[in-house]
Amino acid sequence: MLKTTTALLFLLAVSACSKDAFKRYEKRIIGDWQVEEIKSYGFGSLRIDFGEGDYRFSEDRSFSFTGRTGTEYRGKWEIRKYWEGGNCDDCSSDRIRTLMISAVNDQSGELKSDYFNDIQFTGTDRFNATMANGSRTRVFKFRRK
């Protein structure tokens, strides 16, 4: 009886949770996002090409960004997965996912790119992306639109 109750509670808990947690990051990032907040830590400078605005990550790895002034950029995105201490097949806790975005403004020809050293989903509709360079770190808090 105890085993049946435990199994039933486990199934109820799993079915109540979002299935997004089981999806690959490449699938979870698809859609429209905006930056809620950018937090800065440390000292020194850290260049940001894309900041506050609307981000669209498409399934075909195309990317678009519309800044607060309405300027649009179109390009590509890529997520790479690494493990601290080298690659391994069964690692889980030391997994790091990086995000690279690059895009060009069709009107001016200006090229922009940003590299996030680590991204972590904090829920179905939120993720944090961290940029780090030396003693300066910036954390972008994204929210699905």
Image: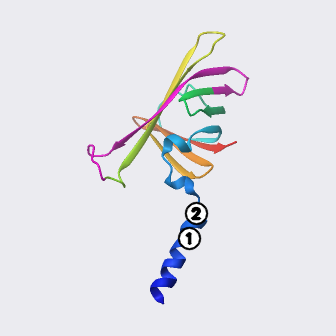
Up-down: is 23 above or below 73? below
Colour scheme shown = rainbow
How far from the left and from the top, in percent, is residue 119?
48, 43
Label 1 – label 2 distance at C-alpha: 6 Å
Residue 12 in which image quadrant: bottom right
Q: Secondary structure at mark 1?
A: helix
Up-down: is 13 above or below 43? below
Q: Is residue 116 found left or right of 37 in the rendered image? A: left
Question: Which residue is drawn at the image coordinates 69% and 20% (left, top)?
Answer: 71
Q: Quick check: marks 1 and 2 in contact, CB under 8 Å?
A: yes
Q: Amino acid at mark 2?
A: Cys
- Would residue 41 be visible to someone looking at this image? no
In the image, residue 70 lies in the stretch drawn in magenta: yes
Q: Amino acid at mark 1?
A: Ala
Disc ID at residue 114 = none
- Categorize mark 2 by other alpha carbons within 10 Å: few (<14), some (14-19), many (20+): few
In the image, residue 89 lies in the stretch drawn in magenta: yes
Please identify the residue farthest to the bottom as the structure is shown.
Answer: 1
- Categorize mark 1 by other alpha carbons within 10 Å: few (<14), some (14-19), many (20+): few
Disc ID at residue 13 = 1
How far from the left and from the top, in percent, is residue 144?
66, 44
Q: Secondary structure at mark 2?
A: loop
Question: Which residue is drawn at the image coordinates 35% and 51% (left, top)?
Answer: 94
How far from the left and from the top, in percent, is residue 125?
63, 49
Quadrant in which the C terminus appears: top right
- Would residue 143 be visible to someone looking at this image? yes
Residue range in magenta is 65-90
Question: Which residue is drawn at the image coordinates 53% and 49% (left, top)?
Answer: 121
Question: Which residue is drawn at the image coordinates 47% and 88% (left, top)?
Answer: 2
Q: Which residue is mark 2?
A: 17
How far from the left and from the top, in percent, is residue 116?
47, 35
